[in-house]
């Protein structure tokens, strides 16, 4: 082994520490500039003034970074994601779909695991809203882990809660509806027992 191999983790930690501060400062500067430009952009758009390539590149970088941060932060801010999906319509650039789809996959899997441990209606609604926003952003997460968890719940918990719904329990009816609504964005079929 070379000494660089032995201290690889320590080296990565030090480099991350060195670059994190300046990167956050640049990010803050870009976000502030983007806020100012986003206020002017509708007026410029009406007048037919196109943004410069440099401005578009800066806004694209800041927007992608901000979107990634929102997806990774706890708790997931669905309202902020929805707002960002609307904001994106106003700008002439593309998202970093590879990176963002990867992050979306990680977040989706995390949300599904949380739901597996605590299968409540609020978690179902969050999952559904998250997948709908991802579709609006044209992001395509890898669904197979989430689909497997959904199928597992469909075979185990769903019949128990369906029984409660059939007996007239309103919270069971809400859960069944939310669970069935989640099937569409996950590209799964609903169970009608």
Image (cartoon, rainbow, N blue to C red):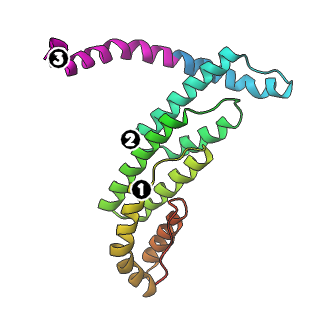
Is 78 contained in the magenta span? no
Q: Which residue is mark 3?
A: 7
**Front-lying residue, 46 or 135:** 135
Residue 5 horizontal side relative to residue 52, left or right: left
Q: Residue 139 in the image: state x and y as whole percent.
A: 55, 44
- Label 1, label 2: how many angstroms apart (C-alpha)? 23 Å
**Label 3, residues with CA under 10 Å away: few <14, some 14-19, many ≥20:** few
> Which numbered disc covers residue 175?
none
Secondary-structure class at tag 3: loop
Q: Residue at x 41, y 38 (%)?
A: 72
In the rendered view, would you say 137 is above or below 59? below
Q: Residue 128 in the image: state x and y as whole percent.
A: 51, 57
Extreme residue toward the right, this view: 47
Residue 1 horizontal side relative to residue 47, left or right: left
Q: Which residues are magenta?
A: 1-28
Q: Residue at x 46, y 55 (%)?
A: 127
Whether tag 1 and tag 3 are in contact, CB under 8 A, the answer is no
Extreme residue toward the front, this view: 1
Q: Residue 53 in the image: state x and y as whole percent.
A: 69, 17
Residue 168 appears anywhere in the view: no
In the rendered view, would you say 77 is above or below 46? below
**Label 2, residues with CA under 10 Å away: few <14, some 14-19, many ≥20:** few
Q: Main secondary structure of the magenta part?
A: helix
Q: Which residue is mark 1?
A: 144
Q: Residue at x 46, y 73 (%)?
A: 176
Q: Which residue is mark 2?
A: 74
Q: Residue 145 in the image: state x and y as whole percent.
A: 38, 55
**Disc nearer the start of the sequence (1/3):** 3
Q: Residue at x 13, y 17 (%)?
A: 1
């Amino acid at each position: 082994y070379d000494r660089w191999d032995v201290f690889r983790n320590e080296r990565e930690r030090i480099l991350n520490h060195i670059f994190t501060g300046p990167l956050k400062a640049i990010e803050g500067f870009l976000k502030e500039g983007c806020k100012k430009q986003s206020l002017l952009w509708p007026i410029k758009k009406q007048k037919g003034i196109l943004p410069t390539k440099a401005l578009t590149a800066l806004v694209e970088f800041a927007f992608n970074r901000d979107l990634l941060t929102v997806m990774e932060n706890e708790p997931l801010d669905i309202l902020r994601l929805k707002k960002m999906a609307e904001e994106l319509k106003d700008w002439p650039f593309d998202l970093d779909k590879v990176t963002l789809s990867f992050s979306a996959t990680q977040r989706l899997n995390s949300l599904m695991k949380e739901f597996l441990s605590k299968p409540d209606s609020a978690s179902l609604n969050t999952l559904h809203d998250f997948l709908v926003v991802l579709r609006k952003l044209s992001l395509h997460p890898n669904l197979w882990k989430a689909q497997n968890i959904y199928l597992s719940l469909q075979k185990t918990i769903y019949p128990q809660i369906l029984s409660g719904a059939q007996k007239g329990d309103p919270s069971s009816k809400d859960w069944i509806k939310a669970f069935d609504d989640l099937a569409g964005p996950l590209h799964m079929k609903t169970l009608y027992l």
